[in-house]
Image (spheres, rainbow, N blue to C red):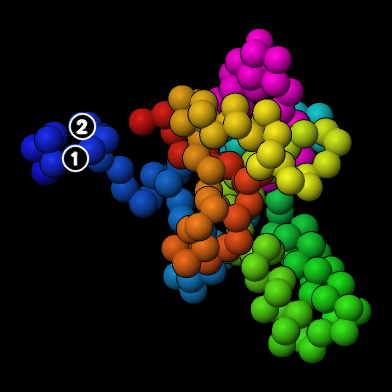
Amino acid sequence: SSDVSSDPYGDLPEGKLSDWNLILLNHEEDNKIDGELDFEKVKFATQYVDSRAGEAYKAMADAAKQEGVTLYLRSGYRSISEQQTNYNANVQREINRGNSKEEAVRLTNLYYTVPGHSEHQTGLALDINVASSSAHFENTPAFAWLKEHCAQYGFILRYGQGKEDITGYRFEPWHYRYVGVE
């Protein structure tokens, strides 16, 4: 609609789900990729990300640093095989805790995504945290800063608190997705 008054966000650009930065991956069967995507990667410490998201992350991390907040990129791009390894290891961890295989898969699906469905395979999903630990990241100055400023750099908090019924994932205060400043 061209009626901006009906749009609480103003005059937003039109996007298509085929846009490189809007690829939708999640638990839904149709929202997957069958192979590795071809994109330029850039490295931050030990992690790779899509270079376009990397430029935005660097600008965001630099701005945070100027305000006394250090952001730490804990996880970025994951290949399908790396995602499979992580997924299988968590299922096995849950089985070792005494859960049935069915329950282990159910519990794993709350935090891990079946290969082909993970946003990390796009290089656009970044797990941002503090260097010391991921426990209770939502109570840190880094999380408060990200929540206030991430959109200015094209990132969204992907799995928000209270949104589990929409996203299909538990609250992950560290998981940010690059969608573009637009």
Residue 122 percent location from the top left of the image = 58, 48
Q: Which residue is found at the position 13% from the left and 41% from the top?
A: 6
The correct choice, above or below, for 60 with respect to 168 in the image is above
Residue type, label 2 = Asp
Side of 143 where 82 appears, left or right? right
Which of label 1 and label 2 is nearer to you?
Answer: 1
- Quadrant in the picture for residue 69: top right
Which residue is situated farthest in the top direction here? 66
Residues packed near mark 2 inside 10 Å, few (<14), some (14 to 19) or many (20 plus): few
Residue 138 percent location from the top left of the image = 66, 42
Q: Which residue is found at the position 45% from the left and 51% from the top?
A: 23
Q: Quadrant of the N terminus?
A: top left
**Magenta extent:** 55-77
Mark 1 touching mark 2, by CB under 8 A?
yes
Q: Quadrant of the C terminus?
A: top left
Which residue is situated farthest in the left direction here? 3
Between residues 30 and 66, which one lies in front from this camera angle? 66
Side of 134 where 121 appears, left or right? left
Name the disc covering residue 11, or none. 2
Q: CA distance from mark 1 to mark 2?
A: 7 Å
Between residues 69 and 78, which one lies in front from this camera angle? 69
Residue type, label 1 = Asp
Which residue is situated farthest in the front direction here? 139
Residue 101 in view: yes
Residues packed near mark 1 inside 10 Å, few (<14), some (14 to 19) or many (20 plus): few
Q: Which residue is found at the position 68% from the left and 28% from the top?
A: 141
Q: How many marks?
A: 2
The correct choice, above or below, for 154 with respect to 162 in the image is above
Residue 62 percent location from the top left of the image = 65, 16
Which residue corresponds to mark 1?
Answer: 7
SS for dot 2: loop
